Image (tube, grey):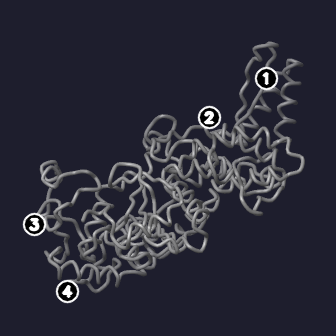
Amino acid sequence: MAEHDMADGDKSEQDKAFRGLKLHNTLTRRKEDFYPLDPDNVRLYVCGPTVYDFAHIGNARPLLVFDVLFRLLRHLYGDEHVTYVRNITDVDDKIIARAAAEYGELPLNEAIRKVTEVTERQYHEDAAALGALPPTHEPRATENIEEMKTMIDELIAKGHAYVAEDHVLFDVSSMPDYGALSNRRLDEMRAGARVEVEAYKRDPMDFVLWKPSDDGEPAWPSPGGVARPGRPGWHIECSAMSARYLGTTFDIHGGGLDLIFPHHENEIAQSRCAHGSAAMARFWMHNGYLQVEGEKMSKSLGNFITIRDAVSEWPGEAIRLAMLTTHYRAPLDFTHDKLSAAKRTLDRWYGYLGDIEAYSGGPNALLDGEGSVGAALKDDLNTPEAIALLHRIGEGVADDHEGEEKARFKAALNLLGLGRLSETEWKSWRPKTMALGEDEIAERIAARAAARAAKNWAKADEIRDDLAAKGIQLKDQRDPASGELVTSWEIKR
């Protein structure tokens, strides 16, 4: 049986757990009805961060996409019936390199601990700023080494892995349908390989399960009878942690499009071959790439943005809304205009709602039923359609003097992870880069306008330059109707 075939149970029983949710399955390349293997324990795994530096805004996309899925699954099956695992990779070459560079005076393992503890805390703060719920479990790779070693030994015993020069490698030729997730044939991958192949590999596509550590680097007793201490390869980490917390076959595995090959392909190979299972995950979901202002994000282009940078200039909810206006499988262009539009929308919605509590008193037509926010999300997380619906009904909600429709509207926003603040909290937000409040900025713009009217150009320029020094960029435009000069402002980027 292939990865997507039914692994356990009677399909008729599974159909009873169907809640109308349809998800695009990367493995089958089509949208399919989702039914969990066990409706009392719906299981989701998503590849988490490698904690060596601030997460960039591209990392925010899977964080938010699968947070919406987590919220939706909890809505459909009940909070206590959904298990969400997102791992922390805390042993990696990038972590080792940064630790050595920043804390060279410390023993390497102590330096690594400093880097990972600080970076993990930063990631949690950034995730909270974007309104992401904590996962049910967040295992660290270094806390699951024994599980990885056990899995590697099983792969060796079953003829799917071999030892060579203190490494343990997976034998891809031992898995007939290797490449099914990425839709690549093994012989084509071999022909297209352009990197120098290590002499100890039997096949150029074989990948590392375990590798030797240099002196001073993190190291554990090796599996497979290897005498030299070492550490795990990246791919085996997720296979071992997902099996520990979700079982050998679970419902959904998610991540970014860039992880399909080789990471997720190799996870499937390791997991199925070690456990002898027909599937690792029934559904594989992947979000599309992110670019910034129409270009690929890179430090060389000067458009590299960390989540920390973004939330210092924009409310976390505005970033969240801006990202969710694009379907998760489509490419996302992260732009200033999109963020500005999201901020204006949230200003309006919070203005409608005031400090009202979300409705929780029973059925909510905005959450369930035909044409609801829930219905849009059940169609492969169609967040653009859900947001369009909220725009359409928002104006009517503004006229609800009794407040019940406003409360229902807020509950619908909450399903997307929006509207989680009070109006007072929303209005109190201001960019961390701003040294002035909005009222103070307005006063200075008025003073500049008065100086210009008096032809005191030096004073007008002084006010403009002082605002610029405090992170406020002024923009003068002529009103098309009156011809008068109108000044607006934005955070200086």
For marks 2 and 4, the one nearer the N-term is 4
Can you say which quadrant of the picture contains the N terminus?
bottom left
Give above or below for 5 relative to 297: below
Residue shown at 29%/60% (left/top)?
A: 265
Residue 314, percent from left and from top: 66, 47
| Along the line of sight, the residue nearer the viewer: 169 or 303 | 169
- Would residue 85 be found to the left or right of residue 132 on screen? left
Describe the element under mark 3 as helix, strand or loop.
loop
Residue 11 coordinates in the image, percent (x, y):
39, 67
Whether residue 207 is visible: yes
In this rendering, the label closer to the viewer, 2 or 4: 2
Reply above or below: 53 against 389.
below
The image's mark for residue 486 is: 1
* Distance between the alpha carbons at the discs numbered 3 and 2: 52 Å
Residue designated by label 4: 227
Q: Compute the Cα span from label 2 to label 1.
A: 19 Å
Residue sticking out furthest to the front? 12
Disc 3 residue type (three-letter): Arg
User: Which residue is label 3 attached to?
Assistant: 202
Query: Viewer-nearest of labels 2 and 1?
Result: 2
- Name the residue type under label 4: Ala
Sequence-earlier tag: 2 or 1? 2
Label 4, secondary structure: give it. Answer: loop
Q: Is 197 placed left or right of 284 in the picture?
A: left
Which residue is the site of mark 2? 337
